[in-house]
Image (tube, helix red, strand yellow):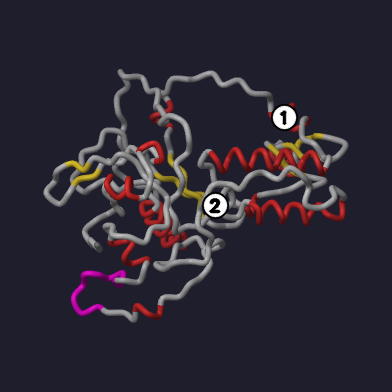
Amino acid sequence: MADTGCQSCLASSKMIHELGLNKHHLIPVTMKMTAADNHSINIIGALVLHITDKLFLSKQACVALGMIPKTFPTIGETQNLCDTKVESCSDSSVAPPCTCSCPLRQPPPPPPTALPFPAVEVNREKLGKWLLEFYKSSTFNVCKHQQLPMMSGPPMRLLVDPNAKPVAYYTAIPIPVHWQDDVKACLDQDVQLIVIEPTPIDTPVTWCHRIVVCAKKSGKPRRTVDFQALNRHALRETHHTKSPFHQARMVSHTIEKAFFQAVEWLDVCGHNGITLNPSKFSFAKTTVEFAGFEITPTSVHPCPHYLKNSTHHH
């Protein structure tokens, strides 16, 4: 059943049982929803499935399926719903209002127990591409149209001094004009993926922090949040780790060892709801940057551009 007033796709517990599933198969969520009569809807969990059955489709889902136009329910607006194009969204910063050719998100396949090619220098790039393809549907699946998986573990806690005085900012930091469309599109996309949710108009706020947009290396906008006011009242936790230098010293340049270390890491991430950007994946390179250090087969030293900037500063 299509319900254009619905903001999420819902299914009853009876349907879940008819699919042979139970609440142990559901992903824990903290989302709260209300029906049209303002009565609370009990959300017991979420599923990432490909279903062909009776269910309630949200307005966003109906648009994505080409059932209704984006302008619905504007009177007099029509569009040829049969002209919906299928395109890849892997390199797009704006999610088009249609389906894409990205693979259906699923758990990682069983990890390989043997090298697909001999671990020699001539096969280094080939092994890296093999890993990207092997985990294309899971750990490296950055599709912008499918809901992101829930990360495993308990909900994140914000350890804030209970006596702290809340700080709310009511004026925004200006965003450069040439970034405004991209930033708005990314915010809308995160709402659709249930990464964030909008605050209804006329809702009083206690804590409210400013968005700060800066440039990525590619020149695209990066959205951050200025949490300085909150951080002043955040309680520090101890998480001891090795220093970046000592971690850099532990990096292998043995291609075979690097392959199985990468397999272990990609498998752990994929099974725990962590998605990685394939464009940032670097396999068994002879020279790499890590945490401000440049790692080569024979040395670990600060990245040259940091030393250059430091010299100019002095």
Residue at mark 2: 215
Query: Between tags 1 and 2, which lies in front?
Result: 1
Horizontal side, residue 226 vs residue 278: left or right: left
Q: Residue furthest left?
A: 37
In terms of secondary structure, where does tag 2 sit? strand
Q: Is residue 163 above or below residue 310?
A: above
Residue at the location (28% across, 51% down)? 10
Label 1 belongs to which residue? 247
Disc 1 crowd rating (10 Å Cα; few below 14, some 14-19, many 20+) is: few
**Amino acid, disc 1:** Gln
**Residue 53 vs residue 238, the one in the foreground:** 53
User: Toward the viewer: 69 or 271?
Assistant: 271
Element carrying mark 1: helix
Q: Position of residue 30 (x, y in %)?
A: 33, 37
Asked whether 265 or 14 is in front, the reply is: 14
**Quarter of the rendering occupied by the N terminus:** bottom left
Q: Quadrant of residue 27?
A: top left
Taking the image as shown, residue 178 lies to the left or right of residue 125, namely: left
Residue at the image point whose x is 35% and y is 38% from the top: 23
User: At x 77% / y 30%, what residue is drawn?
Assistant: 250
What's the amino acid at mark 2? Ala
Gap in angstroms between the C-alphas marked 1 and 2: 28 Å
First to last magenta residue range: 68-77
Q: Give the residue displayed 27% in from the left and 47% down from the top.
A: 14
Q: Is residue 148 left or right of residue 139?
A: left
Residue 175 seen: no
Q: Earlier in the sequence, mark 1 or mark 2?
A: 2
Residue 45 at x, y = what percent?
34, 41
Q: Is residue 177 visible?
A: yes
